[in-house]
Amino acid sequence: MDMARTIAIVEDEPAIAANYRDAFERYGFSVRCYSDRESAMAGFRLALPDLAVIDVGLGDEMEGGFDLCRELRSMAPQLPIVFLTARGDELDVISGLRLGADDYLTKDISIAHMMARVHALLRRMERISQPQAEADETLERGDLAINVDRMLVTWKGQPLDLTVTEFWIVHCLAHYPGQVRNRQQLMDAARTVLDNNTITSHIKRIRRKFQSLDDGFNEIETAYGMGYRWSSRTG
Amino acid sequence: MKLGRQLLVVSLLLLALPLAGVRWVQEMELTYREQQVQVLNASLRSMAASLALQGLLPESINGNGSVYVQPVSSPLLIDGYFEDWKARDLTSRPYADAGHPDFSARVFTAIHSSTLYLAFQVHTGNVVYFAPQGSHQFSSDRIELLTGSAVPDKAVQRYSITTEAPGPVVPRLITNISSQPTFRENRIRGYWRDIPDGYQLELAIPISLLPVSDDGFRHFGFRILDGTGKGVISSFASQPTVNTLPGVLVLPDEPLTQALEPFLEDDLRLGVIDNAGWQIAKTRVGHTEDHHQEEPFWLISWVYRKILSWNNIPEYQAGWRTGSWQNSPLKSVLAGEPSAVWRRQNDNYMLLAAWPLIKQGEDQDPQIVGALIAEQGSDAIMALASRSFNRLFSLSLLVIVLVAGGLLGYASWLSLRIRKLNQATERFFQDGREGRSTLEFPVSTSRDELGELSRSIAAMIRRQQEHTEYLRTLGSKLSHELRTPLAVVRSSLDNLSHESLNDKGQMYASRALDGADRLGLILNSISEATRLENMIASDADLQEFETVDLAAMLSDLFQAYSAIYPDARFQLSSPQASCPVRIIPELVVQAMDKLVANAVDFCSEQGEVTLGLQANGRGYCLTVANDGDLLPEAMQGRLFESMVSVRKTRDEKPHLGLGLYIARLVMEKHGGSIVGENRTANNGVIFSLNFPAQ
């Protein structure tokens, strides 16, 4: 990699911004920090970053991050965007907004997990931009096809728009059809620390996304008390 | 005691009202009686004065040996039978010979027009008839009559009556005491009749045969002689001599009776007795209007009789019939003392009053010559008292009913208000405990103390609500506000771990990271509860409800928990049949997770955790029971509140006391309930999730 990737951090809490910057720089990224929407947009107009990490609440603008995300998405449709929120219960809201973010995380995620996500997203970008030189690692379960490298999921040939967290959950489930994955395993796979309810809502969102393509989707089964499993019927 | 009952008891005080009324009626009645006595006495006094003015006062008599004659309104039959006497309600006077108890007589005397009627009933044991052949006339049973005489030099006339056989008899006039009767006095009619132990003799004598003597009286006496010489019954005490007059014949004084007539009043009877106590004038009872007052209600008349103070009044007894007032309670009048007494006759009360008649001679001292007797019924008083009593009774009944009803109504209204206030308060606190949002507390606008109480409670509740709301949002606020600094801490620690630190530094850093992790877990569980609360409060996920077989689900859970908690011993008690219920399975499983986690933590060493499912009437009931310690008594009501924990020990996982709270929220979402209690055997705890019938 000849040139350091650029990460834009839009965060109004200077300590967090500084910590993330230090961490990213440690991993060899070049980091630009913005503390509000205007300065971030100004910076983006000068030069687009390779990836943006945006806090939902920016100073006085409680949801300034959403507007920023929309503007940035219109400027760069392919740019990976990761949302940070201080409130776990906002995840559903953010998801519902269909802002086109690639992932949304709560702020207390560990830096290691954050790095894993950033790397995954960047690698996906890389793969997508590169012609398909070698065979990607893929996984097929009946109608489900997963391109692990590009983090792409298709159902009956139709692409499914999943966030990174969701992708990892689906991947984890589909990897061992018929086997129950408990919440902890799913959390580990998604490299996150979430409460049980959040895993439930993630599963709910994933099902909904599948069902928007196929009303009859019923492959993710609930094992009461234990967790979830990918249906073994097609496997 | 309920407020209503208390006021009812208080209203019993109203019974003092009729009691006072009864007392008043009694007083009033006494006063009436007093007044009646006074009025009657006043009229008697004026009557006496009037009689004196008319010169109708009787003469004073010597009572010794007097024979009292009762007036009779029609002639009597002279037949030896007494039925006509008795039919006219005439009374007889007993006579006896003190020396011979088996020799007695009863004598009737009556007068009609100018005929004096006499009837003797003599008990001798054995009647000795007159035997004309050879026997002396004086040796048979006979009756002698003695009268004053009109013949000069001879004060007394004697007649002797005897007979050879029962039947009509004619007296003989005895001219000389020792001589045989000389001639028959045919003006006197008589009839002799046998009775088992004696005889009856009936006589009719023209009053002209009893002339008025010098002292102004007609004198009359009789002697009954036994043929065997057993004894003599005499109407007068002294031995008869030629010139000794027998006792006075006391005749009814017709003019006096006439003079009394105008004084009659309703329910009043008047009479005059002479100074010997013989009744010489008697009127009928003054016209009594038929008081057609309807009989009062039996209860009222019973109460009335009970309360009147007349029960100790002696039985009625008067001399109207016999004409003899010597032994009446009024006899003190003959000593010059006006008297009045009340007497009871069945349910009626009679006032008997007497007023002395005093003759004021020109040359002699005032002399009591007799007395006016009056008898008055109490109908007027009774009617009056009864009327006022009736009125009192109905009035006080009305008042009692009204006041008691009013009090009761008022009490009911009061207690209704208090109850409503109480219910509203209870409901509020109930809702508060269960975390439900409450309707506005109904604030009373009334200006009394209850209204004030209601307003104070409302104010208190408002503060409480604010406080509850503050507490409720505290969690989510905290988790929100803490997450940013936590992110600072965590990211700083993450960075720190990449710096070169000595061992101690590493150790502290890793401890700090552990703390941050735990803080993160706490925030996660708080936000989980908050999210659940919001989710349950909204109806957005109604479509999440699906029909699930609880039995199958429980069996899944049983396996899952057995795997998750390998150290715990699980039991399953579930019916074979399917138990379909419409639930949000994820939520119910979460609730079960919490219950099972608790059960495992609180389970005793060798104890078991039992998962159960029962159909309870209309719905189903999931239970999680564990052996072990009982629930603390004080916590029973608050177990399901947010942030309440009964854990005594600390362990790795943070416990915020949100588990049961979440379980309760879940059950509320399903319209069901959660109950935590000690097992009846007191060897553990059982939590039940009750799902209502669909």
Image (cartoon, coloured by chain):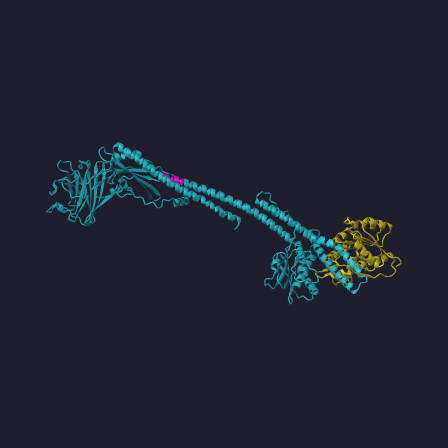
Chain colours: A yellow, B cyan
**Which residue is situated farthest in the top direction here?**
B54
**Residue at 78% across / 65% down in the picture?**
B503
Question: Could you tell me if residue B575 is visible in this image?
Answer: no
Q: Nearer the viewer, residue B214 or A185?
A: B214
Which secondary structure class fits the magenta region best? helix
- Whether the magenta-drawn stretch holds residue A119 is answered as no
Total labels drawn:
0
Relative to B595, B344 lies left or right: left
Relative to B575, B413 lies left or right: left
Relative to B350, B692 lies left or right: right
Image coordinates of residue B581 in percent, x first then y, are: 66, 57
Q: Quarter holding the C terminus of chain B?
A: bottom right
Question: Could you tell me if residue B468 is visible in this image?
Answer: yes
Q: Which residues are magenta?
A: B380-387
- In this rendering, is residue B136 above or below B620? above
Image coordinates of residue B38 in percent, x first then y, are: 34, 37
**Which residue is situated farthest in the bottom direction here?**
B606
Quarter-of-image position of residue B381: top left
Image coordinates of residue B433 in percent, x first then y, are: 63, 53
**Which residue is situated farthest in the right direction here?**
A2
Image coordinates of residue A24 in percent, x first then y, are: 83, 57
Q: Nearer the viewer, residue B16 or B76?
A: B16
